[in-house]
Image (tube, grey):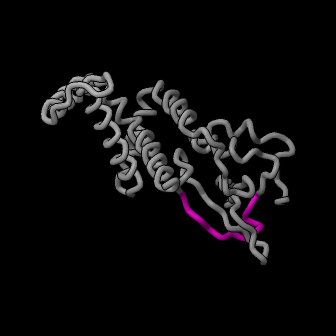
Amino acid sequence: MKRLFKELKDTILAGVVFLLPLLILIVLLGKAYQLLTGVSTKLASLFGVKTLLGLPGHTIASSVLILIMLLVCGYLVRLTLFRRMYNWLDRKLAEHLPPYKVYRELAMSKLNVQEEMLPYKSAASIVNDGTAQPCFIMDELADGSYVVFIPTAGNVKEGNVAILPANRIQLFPGIDIKLYRNALANQGQGIGKLMVPGAGPGVIQ
């Protein structure tokens, strides 16, 4: 039972995050509340619910509709197609509505009340023809090569995994992994401030 409640909670939180950009669009349109009130009032009348625990029937119906909507969106966001749609809409809103990014980060910080455990061993970069691509060290193999995760800029939870020789990798053991990831999630903004003396290169401890 405890596992079921945890699954429901995680799904609802995923639905909230998924709905953030959608809700902003709904607010801009200015029709969400009127539409929801109309539907919930009809549902309350259909089931004959006028009041429950002192609350109007349409308020109860609205709460149930919102909960169902969050659960549905929480499951949809796990599908690749809807995840891509969400990422596209999220990027567009961040580009054209500057306040959106601030409110999104605030909402995310409120949702993620538990400290996130990151699976990375070290911040690093892949050196290739004079350029450097940010990545994370996932593991070190017996032959000295590294398993690296190369995140997508702006969406660091997605990316590619590669196995590369040590001479292709520059380690940054002095850089806080969470700050490094946050900078990548912010399209690379802030990485320069992390590259201070002593941040790298180095070896994994």
Q: Is residue 32 magenta?
A: no
- Residue 67 in the image: state x and y as whole percent: 35, 39
Q: How many numbered discs, if any?
A: 0
- Locate residue 184, reporting x and y percent: 61, 44
Q: Which residues are magenta?
A: 159-170
Secondary structure mostly taken by the magenta-highlighted segment of the chain: strand
- The residue drawn where x is 46% and y is 43% is 13
Q: Identify which residue, 44 or 123, lies in the foreground.
A: 44
On screen, 183 above or below 62? Answer: below
Please say whether residue 168 is one of the residues in the magenta stretch. Answer: yes
- Front position in the image: 82 or 136: 82
Between 131 and 165, the one lying in front of the other is 165
Determine the image quadrant of residue 95: top left
Going by the picture, which residue comes out furthest to the bottom? 143
Q: Please name the residue shown 29% across and 30% down the image.
A: 60
Q: Position of residue 122 (x, y in %)?
A: 74, 55
Instruction: Please name the residue shown 13% across and 34% down the image.
Output: 46
The image quarter containing residue 50 is top left
Is 180 drawn above or below residue 166 in the view shown?
above
Does residue 97 appear left or right of residue 110 in this picture? left
Residue visible at 52% across and 48% down? 155
Q: Which quadrant is the C terminus positioned in? A: bottom right
Q: Is residue 110 left or right of residue 93?
A: right
Q: Nearer the viewer, residue 40 or 14?
A: 40
- Give residue 34's position: percent from left, percent from top: 22, 23
